Amino acid sequence: MLPHADGAPADGPLIDSYGRIATDLRVSLTDRCNLRCSYCMPADGLDWLADETLLWPDEFIRLIRLAVTRLGVISVRFTGGEPLVAKDLERIIATTAAIRPRPEIALTTNGIGLARRAERLRAAGLDRINVSLDSIDAARFAAITRRDRLPDVLAGLVAAKGAGLEPVKVNAVLDPQTGLQDAVSLLRFCLQHGYQLRIIEQMPLDAEHRWQRGAALTADEVLGALRRHFTLRPHPAPRGSAPAQLWQVDAGPATVGVIASVSDAFCSACDRTRLTADGQIRSCLFATRETDLRSALRGGADDEAIEAAWRGAMWIKPAGHGINDPDFVQPARSMSAIGG
Ligand code: SAM
């Protein structure tokens, strides 16, 4: 029997028991990655998910189609691990782009290999891209990611812009020691190249459980450091369900976004539902329960049964991520295995 929470509506939008509606699907296409960011995974990598547990491209496509056509999902973001190392990415994007109503399609990537593929991804139907980049200093980049690949990421950014994947967004998670300096130089770099910087507070989702509340930089600390070099004014546009608080830089129109996932959580506006590379639905990054759609798919479940299981999984979404609660428990999966 597929799990099904009592009370989940049988149709309509993908709603949870607190009334939030999930319209944004995050799909982790693989847990593997070619970087080893210290706040995410150990230097030697992780025990990757076993091949036979990973969804096949056609299984991802079936679930994405079902989410769009039966559950009201309107945007799909591919992530990982590193989605550029996943099988058949362009085909999955092209098939997603053919679904009606057509969802908006976005990708979160570390940018390695993007220089070669940006045009193809755009042609397949990719609408938007976020490239992760935590420092534009080559030595610091290598120290954070444990790989000397800054030039590849910079080339990927140029190619993304050239392919028209605009606005190109840069996601940065700051190092507790050097991050305030990195934030300033990243913002200068993004202003110069026309990229939109998003700074994300580091969350307790590292595989080694080294995250420490007092050590990670907060949004306020980052804004304080940026204000010593730039004038920041709150952006007038309503924030809606966007995780980033947007600031206009100097006279504008350039902006910088700060995502205060820990110090000022935005769970009450969360509109996400997550599918892991091994076919589990997670209602929250920090969920400790998952709903196994892979077994359902492979056991021959029809679309009605899978839809009911997905609805049940979201119905029990917790009110908040609980990071700041005294009894907070870090989820067993780390960010790379959930899909950031
Ligand atoms: N490999 C792709 C990339 O680098 O963008 C996609 C997956 S990665 C897990 C997605 C995003 O999650 C990246 O921007 C990464 O910096 C961020 N991330 C990873 N671990 C994190 C953590 N502990 N706290 C906050 N963000 C994290």
Image: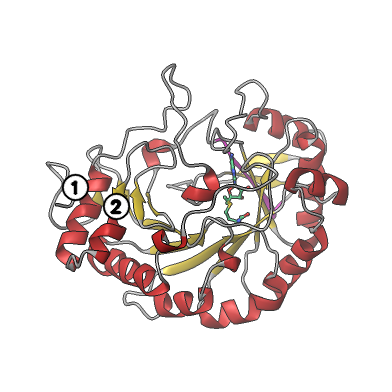
For label 1, the residue is: 3
Residue 108: percent from the left, percent from the top? 57, 59
Report the magenta residues as a range: 252-260
> Mark 1 and mark 2: span between their CA atoms?
8 Å
Question: In the image, 44: left or right of 51?
Answer: right
Lateral position of residue 270 relative to residue 339, left or right: left
Residue 253 within the magenta-colored segment of the rendering: yes
| Residue indicated by mark 2 | 292
Residue 49 is marked as none
Residue 327: x and y in percent read 41, 19
Q: Residues within 10 Å of mark 2 (few under 14, many from 20)?
A: many
**Is disc 1 placed on a helix, strand or loop?**
loop
Task: Indicate yes or no: mark 1 CB to ligand 1 under 8 Å.
Answer: no
Asked whether the beta carbons under mark 1 and mark 2 sit within 8 Å of each other, the answer is yes
Query: In the picture shown, does residue 135 fall above or below 67?
Result: above
Q: Nearer the viewer, residue 269 or 171?
A: 171
- Residue 50: percent from left, percent from top: 46, 57
Q: Note whether 74 is above or below 205 in the view shown.
A: below
